[in-house]
Amino acid sequence: MKIYLDGKFVDEADAKISVFDHGLLYGDGVFEGIRLYGGNIFRLEEHLERLEYSAKAILLKLPLTRKELSEVTCETCRQNNLTDAYIRLVVTRGVGDLGLAPWLCPKPTVFVIASKITLYPQEHYDNGLAIVTVPTRRINPAALPPTIKSLNYLNNILGKIEARQFGALEAIMLNDQGYIAECTADNVFIVHKGELLTPAASQGALKGITRSAIFAIAQELGIPIREQELTRYDVWIADECFLTGSGAEVIPVVKLDGREIGSGRPGPLTQRVLEAFRRRVRIEGTRI
Ligand code: PMP
């Protein structure tokens, strides 16, 4: 596998960064998880825009322009002869000393990994996921805005561990007021009375690229959609529930904390959205 690292394509074994890199020492950096479908990168411009906003929010000056980032992302896929892949684009603060000071890190580190995707097993797309609510809360947007896709993922990781301890693959994380924020690596939608509802970023959700594609799909299909504060009660009485993410795509959820949601089977609106999403990823996108 060839990895893009600071201007060069290197073998996986040579793709190494310093122990003084602040991405490693402090989680000081930003990243994107992007998908390549049939030779097209899905919503690359949106991912790069989010990366730019994340970087700007932490006062990290990206060392590459949008066009250069786009080019190295595409070239990483080409170098590995990939047509379908999961792409990880990371920019860290770079190498500094042992203190926090980002101004002592003269050069951000940039790397791109393009590799095979591990999706949830197909049975979960067919039969739906059983998820749980975990005790670890999503970080308060006033402390660290969740709109920044930063390398600080510890609370999501704790959430993921808790989900596993409860025998689930994904988990709902609440914000500090008890409203639903999102899952550990996915956004959450419910269907209620024919309408799609999802928490706003101000509730602690990442502005997911898949989530934004769902807004476009809902419009195309004529399904009403809006952001709304959601509690677990809203999921208990929802007709359907699904999660979205670049890795997960659109996946039905049929149980929360052991309770059945709706009919206990993936619902018809979820199916329509899922099919429309799969059609869209084949035709939309940047040719590598
Ligand atoms: N929330 C979190 C915390 C995430 O890490 C992700 C991305 N993996 C998502 C939501 C989904 O966002 P996207 O659709 O952009 O992948």
Image (cartoon, rainbow, N blue to C red):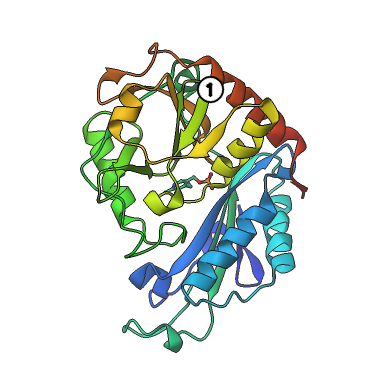
Label 1: state its secondary structure: helix
At 34% from the left and 21% from the top, the residue drawn is 237
Is residue 3 in view? no
Between residue 137 and residue 285, name the one nearer to us: 137
Q: Give the residue type that dot 1 points to.
A: Thr
| Residue tagged 1 | 270
Q: Relative to 121, say whether 215 is above or below.
A: below
**Residue 136 vs residue 29, the one in the foreground:** 136
The answer to which quarter of the image holds residue 69 is bottom right
Image coords of residue 126 (percent x, y):
50, 16
Q: Residues within 10 Å of mark 1 (few under 14, many from 20)?
A: many
Can you give x and y, in whole percent of width and height, for residue 272 in the image?
61, 21
- Which quarter of the figure has residue 199? top left
The image quarter in which residue 50 lies: bottom right
**Residue 85 vs residue 274, the one in the foreground:** 274
Judge whether 253 appears above or below 81 on screen: above
Q: Position of residue 36 (x, y in %)?
A: 66, 43
Q: Position of residue 26 (x, y in %)?
A: 34, 71
